[in-house]
Image (spheres, rainbow, N blue to C red):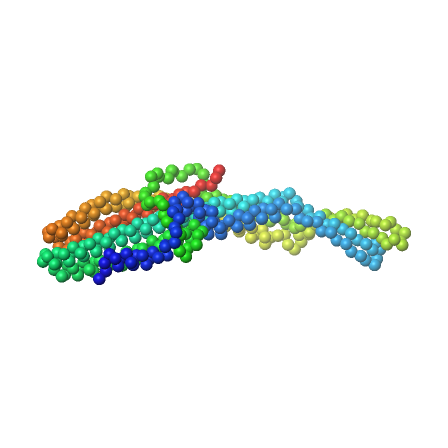
């Protein structure tokens, strides 16, 4: 037979990993930790460094090549310096493509930061919801234990049968198991939040300082600025266009200017040093860079199609998120009213049973409806908070 003492023992076993000192954490602190050390931001940050390196490489001038040689024929000593020519019609598109790719990388990193913010807010909300549900389950189990004691008292007084006691035993056992499961789920939600924050997730080291509540303000209407995803797709298109211009201007290939001198052996009567100046130009006889131009053109076309798809999907996602947010808020507000009614019905049923005016099955049914209504209110409130965060993620704007 499961009693209140056994319930607390099971719940203590479920919460054993939380025996360490816990640090209270607010929602904003969880978000700040995820942005500072979370895995999502940590993995995305190096991409911006790669893009910055590509810009530096694009801006760099090619190094000259020094050459020295010796021949038996005069002049015997040859020294030359080859200077690659970086033409403006090649340098400009090359740098422009790298700069556009860097802008796209920055925009994607900004979106990853917004995604990390959403993950932290959703994880915090899920942990709050799981914690509230665990407390409700423990309370329900305690109420079921009290109802079991009341059924025994009535049976001993001759006002109830053994059937009522057995029903109460089954009800108390089921709710005790549910309380244990919900306690384990609360611990798992806290550990998942710690992982999002970049903390160790082998034991619970934080507690939640905020409460579960609906947001007070609605998000403003989308402005004229671009969302981060669309802005990144536009930057990708600019980079592809610059890359195509670079390949079209690179038909001749790399040209170079050569300067140097030839030096005679000392025993000859010819001048000791002869200057050498020349220009090396590739001849596009067999290859006019057609393959690279075709590949760059295809990449440009794909970037254009990707931009169109991103614009359509972004608008669709925002519209869907707006509908889901409105529906979630409506459900949560409706649940708030239903919870009060269900609690009143459960309290009246219990009073009627204590006075002998109602049967135990009706009391159990009313209590079940009250539990389910309150649980649904918790879940719908959490869903509304997460839907609000999701809409803010999808409508995050690029800085003008």
Which residue shows up at 21% across the image and 47% down it? 343
Residue 37 x/y as whole percent: 47, 49
Q: Would residue 138 be found to the left or right of residue 221 on screen?
A: left
Query: Which residue lies most toward the left here?
Result: 158
Residue 389 quadrant: top left
Residue 91 quadrant: top right
Can see residue 263? yes
Q: Would residue 240 be found to the left or right of residue 224 on screen?
A: right
Residue 344 x/y as whole percent: 19, 46
Q: Nearer the viewer, residue 179 or 106?
A: 179
Residue 368 x/y as whole percent: 21, 53
Count of number-bearing discs = 0
Q: Nearer the viewer, residue 20 or 39?
A: 20
Q: Would residue 64 be found to the left or right of residue 200 on screen?
A: right
Which residue shows up at 21% across the image and 53% down it? 143
| Quarter of the rendering occupied by the N terminus | bottom left
Which residue shows up at 75% across the image and 53% down it? 67
Residue 56 x/y as whole percent: 60, 46
Can see residue 326? no
Q: Nearer the viewer, residue 195 or 144?
A: 144
Which residue shows up at 61% across the image and 48% down it? 57
Q: Nearer the viewer, residue 289 or 147?
A: 147
């Amino acid at each position: 037979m499961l009693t209140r003492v056994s319930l607390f023992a099971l719940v203590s076993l479920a919460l054993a990993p939380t025996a360490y000192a816990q640090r209270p954490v607010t929602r904003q602190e969880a978000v700040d930790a995820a942005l500072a050390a979370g895995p999502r931001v940590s993995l995305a940050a190096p991409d911006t460094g790669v893009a910055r390196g590509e810009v530096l490489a694009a801006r760099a001038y090619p190094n000259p090549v020094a050459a020295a040689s010796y021949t038996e024929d005069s002049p015997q000593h040859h020294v030359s310096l080859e200077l690659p020519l970086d033409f403006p019609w090649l340098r400009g598109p090359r740098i422009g493509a790298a700069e556009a790719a860097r802008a796209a990388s920055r925009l994607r990193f900004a979106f990853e930061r917004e995604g990390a913010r959403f993950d932290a807010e959703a994880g915090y909300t899920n942990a709050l919801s799981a914690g509230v549900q665990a407390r409700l389950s423990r309370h329900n189990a305690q109420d079921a234990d009290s109802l079991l004691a009341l059924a025994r008292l009535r049976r001993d007084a001759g006002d109830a049968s053994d059937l009522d006691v057995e029903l109460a035993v089954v009800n108390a056992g089921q709710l005790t198991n549910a309380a244990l499961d919900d306690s384990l789920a609360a611990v798992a939600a806290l550990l998942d939040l710690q992982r999002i924050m970049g903390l160790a997730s082998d034991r619970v080291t934080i507690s939640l300082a905020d409460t579960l509540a609906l947001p007070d303000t609605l998000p403003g209407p989308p402005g004229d600025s671009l969302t981060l995803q669309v802005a990144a797709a536009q930057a990708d298109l600019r980079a592809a266009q610059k890359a195509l211009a670079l390949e079209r201007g690179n038909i001749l290939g790399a040209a170079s200017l050569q300067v140097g001198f030839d030096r005679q052996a000392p025993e000859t009567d010819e001048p000791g040093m002869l200057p050498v100046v020349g220009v090396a130009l590739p001849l596009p006889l067999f290859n006019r860079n057609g393959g690279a131009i075709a590949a760059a053109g295809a990449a440009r076309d794909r970037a254009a199609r990707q931009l169109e798809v991103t614009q359509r999907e972004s608008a669709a996602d925002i519209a869907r998120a707006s509908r889901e947010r409105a529906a979630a808020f409506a459900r949560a507000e409706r649940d708030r009213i239903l919870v009060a009614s269900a609690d009143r019905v459960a309290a009246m049923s219990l009073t009627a049973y204590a006075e002998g005016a109602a049967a135990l099955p009706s009391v159990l049914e009313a209590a079940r409806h009250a539990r389910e209504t309150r649980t649904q209110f918790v879940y719908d409130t959490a869903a509304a908070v997460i839907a609000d965060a999701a809409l803010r993620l999808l409508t995050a704007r690029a800085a003008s």
